Image (tube, helix red, strand yellow):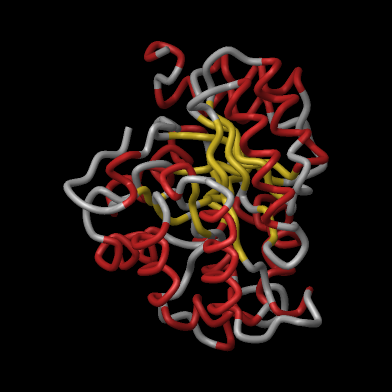
Amino acid sequence: MITARDGVASTMTVNPGSIGIWRPAFQLDAELATEVEKLGYGAIWVGGSPPEDLEIVETLLDATEHIAVATGIVNMWQADPDALARSCHRIEAKHPGRFLLGVGVGHREATQEYQKPYDKIVSYLDALAAADVPGSATVLAALGPRVLRLSAERTAGAHPYLTTPEHTRRAREILGDGVLLAPEQKVVLESDPERARRQARPMVSRYLELTNYAGNLRRLGWTDTDLVDGGSDALIDALAVHGDADTIVRGVRAHLDAGADHVCVQVLPMDIDPLPAYRAIADAMGLSTAV
């Protein structure tokens, strides 16, 4: 559990543990949730801009006993904040202390009205606060310094997507101590590098043409050459850790060593059953023995 001397995170009550899984909403169901909980993961992150009704969150919580469920993320341009707040209160009443609301503005290419995104974030957080959704049960999708600072000021912390341990290190410096930092990390359980890159590139490459992700990678020192043609091998290797379970665990732990509190593991490719990989990673990390 995150504690802090000052700020919103000091009252955070949701405990996601140190390792969670990240899957799009349409690839999550009660059966997967129960298996992941048995394996010892601390949280399930519901990706793919889940709707404001949060029905998938409720389904996952109903099927499990203690694992936390978080959204990664509800899109502020798509979800009405008052309707979202009502869903949050419904879920909190039914499953107290197990739901973490992740919200964000997504990327400009997907939203016609994407102007002044920072102002949108502030006004949306204001609307959630007015509807009694506590900042201590909310996290913010954040990549750049300005939104990272806002996440520390207004919410329990930050949920960066498509990042590297170097970004995690920089984010921790900006956030300071006692603020949740929960980056997402893509992984491929495949020891052949060429095969692993072929499996990872379709998912990673779609983000390299988006302004916010490309800009963040450039801030980290990646060049335009790395971002074209589906991504350089070096960039794919950094954004989608591949190898055996021990190699993947080292990649996950690199975020923790850089200052992350929690890492959301996304198994690639998306068209396979992720449970074998999640089992192998859980065994390599000794998660089940900690439950």
Question: Residue 94 occupies which quadrant of the picture?
Answer: top right
State how many labels appear: 0
- Taking depth in this image into account, of 2 and 201 the one nearest to the observer is 2
Name the residue rendered at 73%, 59% in the picture: 203
Q: Nearer the viewer, residue 204 or 177?
A: 177
Q: Name the residue at 40% across, 68% down.
A: 150
Above/below status of 37 relative to 234: above
Please determine whether, in this image, residue 103 is positioned above or below residue 61. Answer: below
Q: Position of residue 152 (x, y in %)?
A: 35, 60
Image quadrant occupied by the N terminus: top left
Q: Which residue is painted at 64% across and 68% down in the image?
A: 105
Q: Residue at x 43, y 82 (%)?
A: 219
x then y, percent, for residue 256: 33, 45
| Outermost front residue | 130
Position of 113 with respect to 147 (left or right) is right
Which x, y percent locates residue 6? Answer: 20, 52
Question: Which residue is farthest left?
Answer: 5
| Quadrant housing the C terminus | top left
Task: Measuring from the top left, give residue 183's x and y in whole percent.
Answer: 47, 52
Question: Where is 79 relative to 42, above or below?
Answer: below
Does residue 78 appear left or right of residue 155 in this picture?
right
